[in-house]
Amino acid sequence: MHPDPELQFETPERVALSLPVAGLGARALAALLDLLVLFLAWMTAVLLYSLFGDLVGRWQALSGAGQVLAVVGVLASGWGWDVAWEVLWRGQTPGKRALGLRVVRADGAPVGPVESLVRNALRALELPLAYAPAVLMVALGPRRQRLGDLAAGTLVVQERRYDLSRYGPPAGAAARFAALRSRAPGLLGADEFERLTDFLRRRAELAPAPRARIAAALAAAFAARAGLPAPGAVGDQPGDAAGAAEAEPFLEALAYHASEGS
Amino acid sequence: MSAGGRTRNVAAFVRARREAWERLEALSGRVETGRLSLAEVEELDRLYRRTAGDLAHARAAFPGTDAEGYLAQVTARAYGALYRRRRRPLAEVARLFASDAPAAMVGNGWALALSAGLLLAGVAGGALAVALEPAAAGWLVPAAIRDALAARRLWTGDLLSAAPGLAGGAILRNNLAVAALCFALGLTGGLGTAALLLANGLLVGAVVVAAAQAGLGPDLLGFLSAHGPAELSALVLAGQGGLVLASGLVRPGEWPRGLALAVRGREGARLLAVAVPVLLLVALVESTVSPSAALATPAKAGLGLALAAALWGYLWRAGRTEAATATVAGATRGEG
C-alpha cells in the first residue's frame, strides 16, 4: 500500500513541486456526483419540455434524421460529459470541482482534449467489469492511476483549501492600517464582529464579483465609522479594482485588532 | 521584515509574505479565465519566482505546516499559468483535426496497414468460409439474421422501417462502443484490437456471402453501399489508434514503458478522435439514406465512396503537409 502518493515534478528553475494525489474515496464520490448531475440535468430538461409540449407527439413528428440527432444528443451528453468538462474547465468536472480534484498531466499542466479523450475512452474496458479494474488500480497503484490515466499520462490531484488567517493578518495590512490598533476596540458591536468574521471565514467560497462588492461595502462603512478614509482611496472611488484589493486586508486588520482589544 | 523573509517563526513568515502570495493566486486565476496586461504578466513572473523561493524556505524551515502545503499549491498553480504551452482548449481541438490527427494517421503507416489488413483479412476469411462451406454461416452469422435470410427477406428492412431514429441511435451506440473498445484493447498489447478487427471483418464477410447465397445480394449491397465505406474506414482508424497505443507497451524503445505508453496513447487517441464524428455521420446516413427505397444502388454507392474518399483525402493531404513541415523544420534546426 502507498499511504500518501504525491505527484512530483520540477520547474525549469529547479523548484521541486509536489501535489497530493487523490484517493479512491474522493474520486468515486466525484464520479457519483457527476452521474447525479447529468441525470438531474436530463430529468429537468424532459420535465420542462413536457410541461410545454407533448413530448411523445413531438418525438413521433420528428423526421428520421431529427430523431437520430436527438438520440445522438442524449448519447453524446453521456459520452462527452467528462471530456467536455475536463477540457473546458482545466481538468475538472462538476463532481471533481466539488471535491477539489483536478486532472493534470505528469508535468503538472492541465489536461488537453487528447489526454482527456484517452482517459475517458478507456472506460470502455472498465465499464463492462463494473469499474472493478479502476477501483483496484486507484486503491493499490503507486500513483493511483486508472488504466485511462496510465495511457494518457495523467493523474488526479487533490487541491486543499488552506486557511492562512490562523497565522494572523498580513504584516502589510497590520502596518498599513496601524491606525486601527487604537480605534478598532469598541468600534464593532458583538453581532457586527460575528458577521465580519463570518465573511472573512467564508469569502473563499464566494464568487469574485460579489466577494469584492461585499468587502468594499463593509470596508467603506467601517472606515467611515472609524473616521478613516476608505481603504485604497487616494482619490479612487471605493469599489474599483484598487479599492477592492485593499478592502479585504483592511477588514482582516480590523477583525484582528478588534479581537485583540476585547 | 527581513530581506528574503528568512524568519524562524512560521506565523511571522506567513504574515510578512501573505499578501504577495494572495496576489499571485489572484493573477494565476486570471490567467485561467482571461487575459493579463503586460505589466501584470511581469508581476506574475516576479511573484512566482519569489514565492518559489518562499516555498523552498518553508520546506526547509517549516515542513509539514499548512504554510508549506499552501505554498506548494500556489506555486504549482502559478507554474501552470506561467509555463502553459498549450493553446486555449477550443483552439487545441481545432488543431487536433487540422493537423495533429492527420499527422498521426500518416506517421503510423504500419499501424494503418495492419489495422486495414486485419479487417480485410476478416472480411475475406468470412466470405471464403461461407462461400466454400455454407454451414459455416451457422456460427459466423447471428441467428436473427440467419432466420431473416431463410425467410428470403432482408432483416434491415424490418429493423429500420419500424423506427428509423431509434435504430440510428442503437447503431451509433454500438459503433461508438466498438470503436472505443478497439482503441482501448490496445492495452492488451494489440491482441484484443486485432481480434476485434478480425471478428468484425468475419461478420461482414460472412453476412454478405450468406445474403448473396439467399439471393438477397443486390438488396444488401444497396443497403450497405451508402454508409459501409465510411463505417469501415472509421473502424480501421480506431484500430490504428489501438495499435499505436499498443506499440507504447510492446515496443517502448529507449523510453520507460509508462512514458512510452502515455505518449503513444495520446497519439493513438487522435485517430479515435477522428473516428467518432465519422461514426456520427455514418449513423445518420445508415438510418436515413441506406434504407431509402427512393435512391438507386449506384447513387448510394456513389455517396458512400465519396464520403470515404473525402475522409481519407482530408487525412492524407493534411497529414502530408504536416509531415513535410516537420521535416523542413527539423532540417532547418539541423543546419542551425
Image: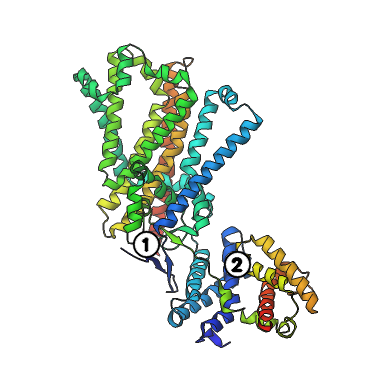
Q: Residues within 10 Å of mark 1 (few under 14, many from 20)?
A: few
* Disc marking residue B93: none
A213 lies above or below A193? above
The location of residue B215, given as percent across then percent down, is 31, 12
The residue that appears at 26% across and 57% down in the rendered structure is B253
Residue occupied by mark 1 = B334
Q: Residues within 10 Å of mark 2 (few under 14, many from 20)?
A: some
The residue that appears at 53% across and 73% down in the rendered structure is B48
The residue that appears at 48% across and 36% down in the rendered structure is A75
Label 1 with label 2: CB-CB less than 8 Å: no
Residue A93 in view (yes/no): no
* Disc marking residue B26: 2
A121 lies above or below A144? above
Task: Give the tally of numbered discs.
Answer: 2
Observer-nearest of A48 and B145: A48
Give left or right: position of B215 versus B128.
right
Observer-nearest of B250 and A170: A170
What amino acid is at disc 1? Answer: Gly
Give left or right: position of B241 versus B161.
left
Q: Report the residue that reaches farthest toward the left.
A: B133
Chain identity of mark 2 = B
Give left or right: position of A71 versus B30.
left
Residue B138 in view (yes/no): yes
